[in-house]
Image (cartoon, rainbow, N blue to C red):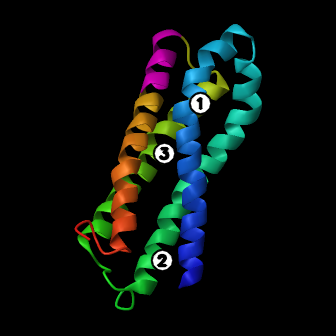
Amino acid sequence: MWVYEFLHVLVGILWIGLLYFFNLVQVQSMPQMTEAGAAKPYTQIILPRALFLFRWAALLTVVTGIAYYIAGRGTVEGIPSAEIMVGMLLGIIMAGNVWFIIWPNQKKIIAGELEGDALAKAKRHAFLASRTNAWLSLPMLVGMVAANHGGLGF
């Protein structure tokens, strides 16, 4: 069971770390990168790799989390608890945002398939889904940590 927990934490750190990178570094830096002529190399070389790791870390975090939950039911104190269920639900919503909103829009943006209003709309949808995930990550982390440390009232 510790293997599921270890893998869940490991890929979760990768996923949330990339989420915060995109929201706190990339979004803020993109205007300067565009002015300096560095945006295209970044979006063609670094961004596809980062998005690959981002979406697969999201999926693996959910899969290992569910495996850990199933393996620990009845043996880990406090599972199932309301806190872990809220954390799991938020994590699943966030992974859905990654796979069904962020990635499809980013794929079109990187490929250069969109122009004008369609491009602006795709960028906006990807940004809003990513920003939503960043905000959802806070109560998700609180719920998941609280579930293994005595609950929210402890």
User: Going from the N terminus, do you reach mark 2 or mark 1 first?
Assistant: 1
Tag 2: residue type?
Ala
**Residue 109 located left or right of residue 75:** right
Say above or below: 98 vs 118: below
Q: Which residue is mark 2?
A: 67
Q: Is the residue under label 1 in contact with that under label 2 (CB below 8 Å)?
A: no
The C terminus - image quarter:
bottom left
Spatial CA distance of label 1 from label 3 is: 18 Å
Tag 3: residue type?
Val
Q: How many marks?
A: 3
Say above or below: 128 vs 87: above
* Residue 25 badge: 1
Q: Nearer the viewer, mark 1 or mark 3?
A: 1
Instruction: Look at the image and give the residue range highlighted in magenta.
Output: 116-124
> What's the residue at 47%, 31% (across, down)?
126
Picture coordinates of residue 33, whole percent (x, y): 68, 16
> What's the residue at 61%, 20% (across, down)?
30
